[in-house]
Image: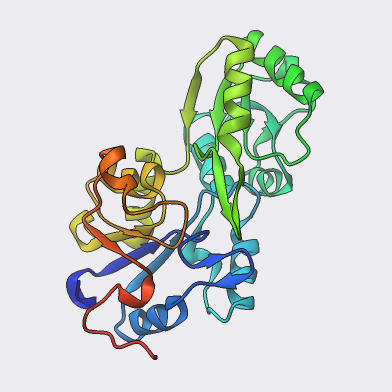
Amino acid sequence: MYINDFEAYCFDLDGTIYLGNEILPGAKEMLEALRMNDKKLLFITNSPTQTREDCQRRLETLGIDVCHEEILTGPFISALYFAENFPDAVIYVVGEEAIKTEFNYFQLNMTEEPMEATHVLVGLDRTFTYDKLNLAMNAVRNGAKIIVTNPDPTCPVPGGVVSDTYAIARAIEVASGQSIFQVTGKPSVFYGERILKELNVDRDQCLIVGDRLETDILLGKFNEISTCLVLTGVTRKEEVDKAKIYPDYIVNDLNTLFVDVKQPC
């Protein structure tokens, strides 16, 4: 792949740009090369526990200059989904402060009373309990629709993975007997359309780079955008044929993304 093959580049964060508190090989140099070549950049994460400003601060701590307008997160996309589709919804949130921050930004109506809810928004909640499961379950049994920030069952961390949003969402789905109504994060068409709107480019001029087949790569497939799988996160190369989800490109790390950009040894 050559750096001028595309006008715009979208990068997942966890497992692609960084892992834990460490920047991954080639990420900083590659992003600087893209900036120098006047490419449009967008950072696209499903992380349900970070606002755009949180991600901006984290990237800047790692030495990557970025503005929050170049970032899409799980909470922001979910808030945008409600604002555009269900602006009058009464939302019971299973999740952390980042979700509530973004929902307040869009002036959405949240409730602490599950039986008042028209929708249950499920994100990662690292204090999730049996009692919280029962509250969400009963809201759904009372008619609330389940909306999920992201379909990730796990999230990569140094040394392995931890459980993520979809583990909680499936528990609520099974307990309530009601199917999930909408997943707003990657790989949804809603997310893909927002990417193209933010970048203001044709889909054939955009590349999505990420480490997860069922979110990053499917996001491209569902939205007819080219994709590149990077093997620094949760996916091993041998898993591609097994999953039958085929990216357009596969690279070991971001050092090898472009054949015409020399990386330091």
**Above or below for 135 versus 76:** above
Query: Which residue is pictured at 34% across the width and 62% down the height?
Result: 199
Rendering coords of residue 193 (x, y %)? 34, 46
Query: Which residue is pictured at 74% across the width and 47% down the height?
Result: 97
Rendering coords of residue 38 (x, y %)? 31, 81
Query: What is the quadrant of residue 168 in the picture?
Result: top right
Residue sticking out furthest to the bottom: 264
Query: Which residue is pictured at 55% across the width and 32% down the height?
Result: 148
Residue sticking out furthest to the front: 238
Which part of the image, by quadrant, shows the N terminus?
A: bottom left
In-image side of 136 versus 249 (left or right): right
**Above or below for 246 versus 134:** below
Q: How is the image coloured?
A: rainbow
Query: What is the quadrant of residue 198 in the picture?
Result: bottom left
Rendering coords of residue 161 (x, y %)? 59, 49
In-image side of 145 versus 242 (left or right): right
Rendering coords of residue 9 (x, y %)? 33, 66
**Above or below for 36 versus 206:** below
Which part of the image, by quadrant, shows the C terminus?
A: bottom left
Query: Which residue is pictured at 49% across the width and 60% down the height?
Result: 15
The residue nearer to you, when weighing 83 against 254, is 254
The residue nearer to you, when weighing 111 against 225, is 225
The residue nearer to you, when weighing 21 against 208, is 21
In-image side of 51 versus 208 (left or right): right
Query: What is the quadrant of residue 248 in the picture?
Result: bottom left
